[in-house]
């Protein structure tokens, strides 16, 4: 498996982990019985539960850009230093972003988010031979 596809698989594994973190935070804040119901009248999320929700949605949004580009590169047989670097930047930045987001570090987490976006842009540019 290519480095890019490995980073995509790792990013999906991170998604699974973030789903578990968010679900655990929701159960702790709302209660398992409430969450097992229809969820029509949930209480407002706790601060931490809200943070885990935002983190999860943010990761899904990042994957929505990253995954198609990696798959396009794979089916197009495009793999070079820039696609590898872009994929690695995306994944490792997303791990650091998740950690800093969960513990509430504001500016550093934004830097990690930007690095992840830069990795995605690198792959996009590499697909068109621009880097």
Image (cartoon, helix red, strand yellow):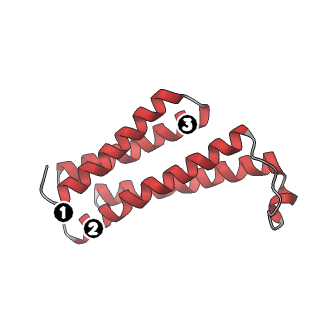
Q: Quadrant of the N terminus?
A: bottom left
Residue at horizontal 81 percent and vertical 68 percent from the top: 38
Residue at horizontal 47 percent and vertical 55 percent from the top: 61
First along the sequence among labels 3 and 2: 2
Position in image of residue 59 (x %, y %)? 50, 51
The answer to whether the residue labelled 1 contacts the one labelled 2, judged by CB atoms less than 8 Å apart, is: yes
The residue wearing badge 3 is 101
As drawn, 37 above or below 62: below
First along the sequence among labels 3 and 1: 1
Position in image of residue 74 (x %, y %)? 26, 67
The answer to whether the residue labelled 3 contacts the one labelled 2, judged by CB atoms less than 8 Å apart, is: no
Position in image of residue 117 (x %, y %)? 35, 46
In the rendered view, does 46 fall on the left or right side of 59?
right
The residue wearing badge 2 is 72
Disc 3/disc 2 C-alpha distance (Å): 30 Å
Q: Secondary structure at mark 3?
A: helix
Disc 1/disc 2 C-alpha distance (Å): 8 Å
Residue at horizontal 23 percent and vertical 53 percent from the top: 83
In the rendered structure, find residue 78 and report the number of the disc placed on it. 1
In the rendered view, does 4 fall on the left or right side of 96?
left
């Amino acid at each position: 498996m290519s480095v890019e596809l490995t980073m995509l698989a790792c990013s999906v594994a991170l998604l699974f982990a973030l789903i578990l973190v968010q679900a655990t935070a929701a159960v702790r804040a709302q209660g398992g019985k409430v969450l097992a119901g229809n969820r029509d009248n949930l209480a407002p999320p706790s601060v931490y539960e809200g943070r885990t929700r935002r983190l999860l949605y943010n990761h899904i949004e990042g994957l929505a850009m990253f995954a198609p580009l990696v798959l396009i590169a794979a089916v197009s047989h495009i793999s070079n230093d820039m696609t590898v670097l872009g994929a690695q930047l995306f994944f490792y930045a997303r791990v650091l972003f998740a950690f800093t987001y969960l513990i509430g570090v504001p500016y550093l987490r934004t830097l990690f988010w930007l690095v992840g976006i830069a990795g995605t842009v690198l792959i996009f540019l590499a697909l068109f031979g621009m880097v």
